Image (cartoon, rainbow, N blue to C red):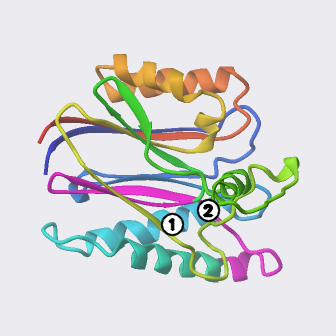
Amino acid sequence: MPSLRAFALTDIGRVRRQNEDRYLLDKDAGLFGVADGVGGLPGGADAAQRCVDEVTPGIRAVAPEQLPNYTAIVHLTNESVATLGQKISPAMGIGSTLTFGCVRGNLLQIAHVGDSRCYGWRGGQLLRLTEDHSVENEARMRRAKGEVVYYHEANRNALTRCIGQPTPPDVDLISRPILAGDRYLFCTDGLTRMVPDSELAEFIGKATDPEQVQREFTALAVRRGGPDNVTSVLIFVDAV
């Protein structure tokens, strides 16, 4: 396992009555990530918590020298959240985003469903490693293929897939060899809607400690209105 420093922070923000975000931080298992209960549905906190409760043992059950089957773990988590949704909200169900990464050897593997994000910082540049699964993004990608796609502006940020949906979601899988000096940020949209990528790059690039910089950019998101819960997990790779 590379030498890592990691910290997780969550803030309820200024508007929401409940924090429906959850995070994954298990250094022994090399597991890091976030889950964000879907707004507009009941049971968002329950859905996000169930994601954490399913993914953590799913990763821990795999020997350190083996690579987990991330799609299978996500699909089992989806089934568990959907089943819970039938109890909590039979008419509407419940849902959550889920974006997590696992470090095995010198490789970071990311599994992603929804609009939470993972960023990688290397050599002075911040790269968004995940794509939001939103109506706007899906329309943009389909238009790039030559399709004619329309959507209502009010629905541009609506999710096109989430954990808890009736059918198993497509899971984006991203693999990235890690290098000494890399930094990785997993975060919910309560952060990214308030603090743009350019500012996140500046924060992360100048930081010497993950906890301090997270407190700084979380406080900024809250000062700018804090309309949603703000959650992040930041990893510094000190050596590989």
Q: Are marks 2 and 1 in contact (CB under 8 Å)?
A: yes
Choose between 235 and 110: the one closer to the eye.
Answer: 110
Q: Quick one: quadrant of the C terminus?
A: top left
Q: Which residues are magenta?
A: 85-113
Identify the residue shown where x is 78% and y is 50%: 156
> For the residue labelled by badge 2, is the local secondary structure a helix, a strand or a loop?
loop
Q: Residue 94: within the magenta?
A: yes
Q: Is residue 233 left or right of residue 93?
A: left
Q: Position of residue 193 (x, y in %)?
A: 66, 35
Q: Is residue 100 left or right of residue 139?
A: left
Residue 49 picture quarter: bottom right
Q: Is residue 100 left or right of residue 181?
A: right
Amino acid on which disc 1 is placed: Cys
Up the image or down, 130 lies above or below 45; here it is above
Q: How busy is the neighbourhood of tag 2: few (under 14 within 10 Å), some, or many (20 plus)?
A: many
Identify the residue shown where x is 21% and y is 31%: 181
Up the image or down, 107 lies above or below 124; here it is below
> For the residue labelled by badge 1, is the local secondary structure a helix, a strand or a loop?
helix
Q: Residue 211: within the magenta?
A: no
Q: Position of residue 179 (x, y in %)?
A: 18, 39
Q: Position of residue 41 (x, y in %)?
A: 77, 63
Amino acid on which disc 2 is placed: Ser
